[in-house]
Amino acid sequence: MNLLLQKISLVGISLFLSLLTFGQNEIVPTECTAETFTVSEGDLFYDTGGPTAAGVTCDGSSGDVADGYYPNSNCETPTTLEGALTVDFLFMEVFGDFDWLEIHDGTSTADPSIFDSRDMPAGTQTVADILSTFGTTEFSGTSGNLTFNFRSSSVVNRCGFEIEVTEAEGGGGGPPVTDCEFTCPDNQTVDNDAGECGAFVNISLPEIMGCEEFTSVFEEDFNACELPAGWTLAAENTNEPDTLIAPCGDNLFSFECLSYPGDDGSDAEADGAFGNDCALVIDMNSSSLGQQSGGIASVTTPVIDLSANDLAFIQFDWQLEDFGGFGALNVNVWDGSQWVNVFTHTDSDEYNLEEQVDVTDYINPDFQVQFEFDNEGRDAISLLWGFAINNFSVFADDPSATASIVNDYNGSENASDFYPVGTTTVTFFEENDPDNSCTFDVTVEDTE
């Protein structure tokens, strides 16, 4: 029988997020080595250099391996992702004159190729090149396995690539789950049963805290490239908001943009990391607005009922381009009676993937999220930019979540059993995470 998870009370977002771990693995292959990894939806696959280090700008030139640039290995590195059906390039910067990447539908480099970077123009190859060459950044197979073969030369390197497994056999990587904390029963010492070489020992169940499981209760990836059903627009100093939806760059609101406000080619890294797919865009520099560009514009989600939940957070990708210090991205939530600001960013040329904001304090049956661009008082006839939002989700705790706990003595949840004379060390562990465990001793003394 599964144990009901006990709720945890988290104080502040730092504690909330420090406990949070995702059903998402970061896979970094060993250079010049053939390897196989079993994957789930949401897992990330990298080049042999791994993720780019924080603060490092990939600018199309060579860099240090310590910063996440792939090493000059002068070899091929074949890697099979077992269970992968579809993958999506989130970022790519590979020097196509010497280095290349292939994807094969199967477990071998002899299987059919579904992607070959050598089909793209030479030089530094990016996600934009993938999109222009293949018309998509997503690639799918039918075998249930995908094999990547990455060749890096002995000279010149780049930041490499980040590829997400967006579809896998057996379902996704699962919702975020906080690390369980186990407190085992105290050590127990008993006398043996008369005439027996041991004794039956009654053992209480371990105390379990922090096994809160989260599930996505609302998602919007904007891949339909249009205003999603139930979302609403608002704008000050403009015409009616629903007349301001247009193709990318033609009006205030767009859901078709593949590049983002202020993109003059200098933000290629941000655009590449952002996925190069449709997103929610507010662009106050759009050509048809003129003096109407001043003020505040926002897009608001439908009502999301969180009344059954105790914990919640929102997650989204964002990119902001202000102009001359003017322009702010505000994220507000409806707490049941008023809008409350939970996130603000004002720096130019900034972006972030999977921004997470704790909204536990604002849970209510009429919960909503509002993405707002504020021109911060800039003259309406002056230049302004805006922001883009993508891959929005609301995660909340699952009230029905349970943890499967077993022990290594009899393989069940209940460790009460017959124990031999002497000391037996017993371990309780989470079935889906055996490293998450606690131990205690059961000692049976021979009194005969």
Image (cartoon, rainbow, N blue to C red):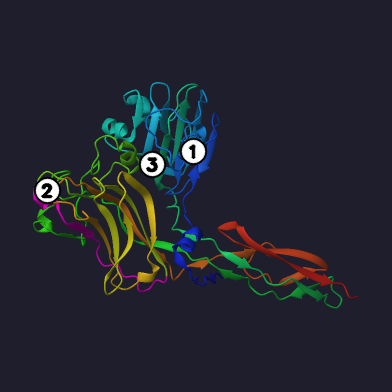
Residue 87 is marked as 3
**Residue 322 placed where, x, y %?**
25, 47
Residue 50 is marked as 1
Q: Dot 2: within a 10 Å radius of its alpha carbon, few (fewer than 14), some, or many (20 or more) residues?
A: few
Q: Is residue 52 left or right of residue 386?
A: right
Residue 125 is inside the magenta segment: no
Q: Is residue 174 left or right of residue 421?
A: left
Residue 368 is marked as none
Which quadrant would residue 61 be assigned to in this image?
Answer: top left
Mark 3: amino acid: Val
As drawn, 108 above or below 362: above
Question: Residue at coordinates 46% horizontally, 50% vertically from top-left?
Answer: 24
Residue 180 visible in the current orientation: yes
As drawn, 39 above or below 366: above
As drawn, 408 above or below 96: below
Q: In the rendered structure, which disc, 3 or 2, sits on the residue that comes first in sequence?
A: 3
**Residue 15 placed where, x, y %?**
49, 63
Q: Which residue is mark 2?
A: 381
Q: Is residue 307 left or right of residue 155?
A: left
| C-beta proximity under 8 Å, tags 3 and 2 | no
Q: Which residues are magenta?
A: 290-310
Q: In the rendered structure, which disc, 1 or 3, sits on the residue that comes first in sequence?
A: 1
Quadrant in which the N terminus appears: bottom right
Of residues 206 and 248, the one drawn nearer to the viewer in this rendering: 248
Q: Secondary structure at mark 3?
A: strand
